[in-house]
Amino acid sequence: MNFEEVLETIEKVLLSRKLTPIERFILHQSWLGKAYTQMAEESSYCSAYIKSIGSKLWQDISQALGEKVTKKNLHLIWNDYHKKQQKLRGS
């Protein structure tokens, strides 16, 4: 699954809302494995602000999925979610 599919699923299925530009940035950079400090260096935001917005985003996604999502386990949780959805569609 590529990032655009992940973003679309999060916005349309899980959260039922469009992510803000900063949330999209954090999600995309996290998907690429970047640290908050790296994100801050590549943007006009400080790392504390990025971390704060990221934390809220992970909480929202965690609540929608029913399991804890973090920047570090994003790929793992997402792969599990995707496999479950494929099984549901296939049965």
Image (tube, grey):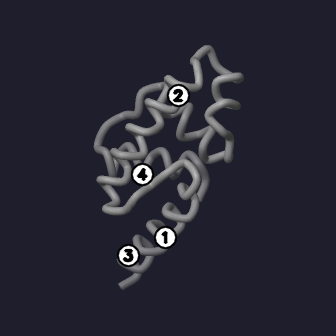
Residue 44 in percent (x, y) is at 61, 14
Crowd tier of the residue under label 3, counting other residues whose Cα lies within 10 Å: few below 14, some 14–19, many 20 or above: few
Residue 3 in percent (x, y) is at 58, 48
The kind of residue tagged 3 is Arg
Residue 80's label in the rendered image is 1
Task: Note whether 61 is above or below 68 in the view shown.
Answer: above
Tag in front: 3 or 1? 1
Tag in front: 2 or 3? 2
- Residue furthest to the front: 48
Residue 18's label in the rendered image is none
Residue 89's label in the rendered image is 3
The kind of residue tagged 4 is Thr
Q: Are marks 1 and 2 in contact (CB under 8 Å)?
A: no
C-alpha distance separating marks 2 and 4: 22 Å
Residue 9's label in the rendered image is 4
SS for dot 4:
helix
Question: Which residue in the protein does label 2 denote?
Answer: 50
* Labels 3 and 1: the sequence-earlier one: 1
* Labels 1 and 2: the sequence-earlier one: 2
